[in-house]
Image (cartoon, rainbow, N blue to C red):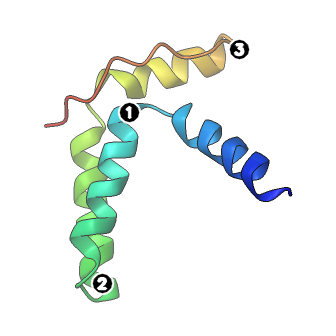
């Protein structure tokens, strides 16, 4: 009886994050499935480094500092 309400809560938490950050996370997971731990970690850092320049990174920090909901830009990843 609590499964669906809890699933919806978790989905809302995930959906509140920047779409580009979620896409980068998903990419890191899928690309790393067949890698060893060291290679997967290096791949994850490479993806994170590529995401650092995305406008949503600055927007997230600004929104946090201003105690407001962020206004995410979208999915464009380099």
Q: Residue 36: which quarter of the image?
A: bottom left
Q: Does the residue at mark 2 contact the one at mark 1 (Cβ under 8 Å)?
A: no
How would you rate the neighbour count of disc 2 (Cα within 10 Å): few for under 14, some for 14-19, many for 20 or more? few
Q: Which residue is mark 2?
A: 38
How would you rate the neighbour count of disc 1 (Cα within 10 Å): few for under 14, some for 14-19, many for 20 or more? some
The Cα–Cα distance between marks 2 and 1, rounded to whole angstroms, is 27 Å
39 lies left or right of 5: left
The Cα–Cα distance between marks 3 and 2, rounded to whole angstroms, is 37 Å
Location of the N terminus by quadrant is: bottom right
Q: Residue at x 42, y 19 (%)?
A: 72
Q: For marks 2 and 1, give the one nearer the viewer.
A: 1
Direction left: furthest residue: 78
Q: Is residue 34 above or below residue 42?
A: below
Q: Position of residue 50 (x, y in %)?
A: 21, 44
Q: Which residue is mark 1?
A: 19
Q: Residue 64: which quarter of the image?
A: top right
Q: Residue at x 63, y 36 (%)?
A: 12
């Amino acid at each position: 009886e609590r499964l669906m309400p809890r699933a919806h809560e978790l989905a809302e938490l995930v959906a509140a994050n920047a779409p580009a950050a979620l896409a980068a996370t998903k990419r890191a997971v899928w690309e790393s499935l067949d890698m060893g731990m060291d290679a997967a970690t290096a791949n994850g850092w490479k993806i994170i480094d590529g995401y650092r320049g995305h406008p949503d990174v600055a927007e997230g920090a600004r929104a946090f500092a201003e105690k407001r909901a962020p206004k995410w830009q979208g999915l464009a990843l380099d």
